[in-house]
Amino acid sequence: MRQPLARELHDLLERGRDRQLRLAVTGLSRSGKTAFLTSLVNQMRHAGLEARLDLLPAAREGRLLGARRVNQQDLGVPRFPYDQAMAALEETPPRWPEPTRGISELRLAIRYRPPRRGLLGSDTRQLTLDLFDYPGEWLLDLPLLAHDYPGWCQAQQALTGTERRSLFADWHAAVAALDPTAEADEAQLAAIAERYAEGLRAAREAGFADLQPGRFLLPGELAGAPVLQFFPLPGLARLDPAERERLPPESNYATLARRFQYYQQHIVRPFYREHFRRFDRQIVLVDLLGALNAGPERFQDLSRALATLMQSFDYGQRSLLSRLFAPRIDRLAIAATKADHVTPEQHGRLVGLLEALLAEPLKDLRFASVPVRALSLASIRASEAREVEHRGQRSPALRGTSLDGEPLLLFPGEVPDRLPDADFWARQGFHFPAFRPLPLEGGALPHIRLDAALDWLIGDKLT
């Protein structure tokens, strides 16, 4: 069959059915998932009018006709609060939307024209894009599926940084007196578990990322339930494995191990099975600048959390059989967020640092032939690039407003393009200030390279 005719027949078949894509927006707490989703929907709603999507060919060529929100498939999942997010950005002064505290979903119907004319002339097609958001804290539970209770205790015991350990001082004092072989006291276990949860919350506020279990940070309807009343047991290696197995079911060890296993099977596994196993594409958002601000121990903590987390996702090329029986993510973007918090010439260095931070996961992905792209972006731009003159020399700067309302004009500093070593941390600190969103002036939300991310994630589906 002649190739042009085969292409025309393929177009006719494609025209008879809509395309569908499921996109997971992934990232740890405060990485910018809510801002990304809000800006994505906003740009699509403005498509064909005032969208800022020059790096998305379908928009640049005038083929992207628009989008609207439609009823989602899963009626048991809350809808992503787009209207509330936009209302926050439209306030005077504008403020950042509240982060979501549970799973949410949003479905967009995107209309577009293909780049080629078919046998029937010009036509329109539709891409149904399902978007999923969930708390970054819950993501941290996925690696738990790779552990049994003793293994998890050992992994948590290995997290021994000075700053981190100090935040768990009250828990360490409480758990030191607990005998793993003694009969469990429900009130005592609940009190020690609360000390552990307090340590996790303090660590999150201090900028740490590798925090498990994630539901201790956002318990929701599980608050107060025994399933959230477990914790790692220090010094468990001193108990012989055979001796541990002989302990009675009412012992502290057996009670904690049972709760850990219940948490795995009834909280973590259903979350993974019902949500992550169904995605087609994924973007992982990373707040590198926040980690640099927080210091070396917390920067290393972020690196460890991301590397462990990415081992939990199922990446690989799709075939028809794999799609039917073992769906996997077949295209991935990894993005350093808040690129508007550094001057434009630092954006390349931000990508270099991201690739260095995730060097091992990226090697594994490329070995598995998974298409992956690293980039920097700002989903909703909060600053403007400027230049300042000093003694006849012009230097880059940013102009914006602090979260407290203070006008700022500054050079935030240089981003290292490789992993900082101890000497680097000793001679240079970081201060990348947080900006308030820019006042909206009509049209679509301002951003940096959101369109590049969209081209990578959905551009091939708009042809």
Image (cartoon, helix red, strand yellow):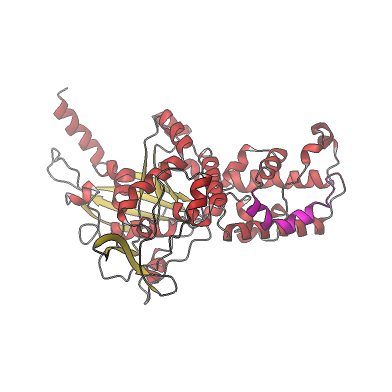
Q: Give the residue at x 29% y 46%.
A: 455
Q: Give the residue at x 46% y 40%.
A: 358
Q: Does the magenta stretch include residue 167?
A: yes
Give coordinates of residue 90: x percent, y percent.
Answer: 35, 72
Q: Residue furthest front?
A: 391
The image shows residue 241, relative to residue 345, as above or below, that is: above
Q: Residue furthest right?
A: 182
Specify the quadrant of the image occupied by residue 391.
Answer: bottom left
Q: Can residue 17 be seen in this view?
A: no
Q: Can residue 199 be seen in this view?
A: yes
Left or right side of 169 for 248: right
Q: What stretch is highlighted in magenta?
A: 161-182
Q: Residue furthest bottom?
A: 92
Specify the quadrant of the image occupied by residue 12.
Answer: top left
Give coordinates of residue 175: x percent, y percent.
Answer: 78, 53
Specify the quadrant of the image occupied by residue 316.
Answer: top left
Give coordinates of residue 231: x percent, y percent.
Answer: 72, 50
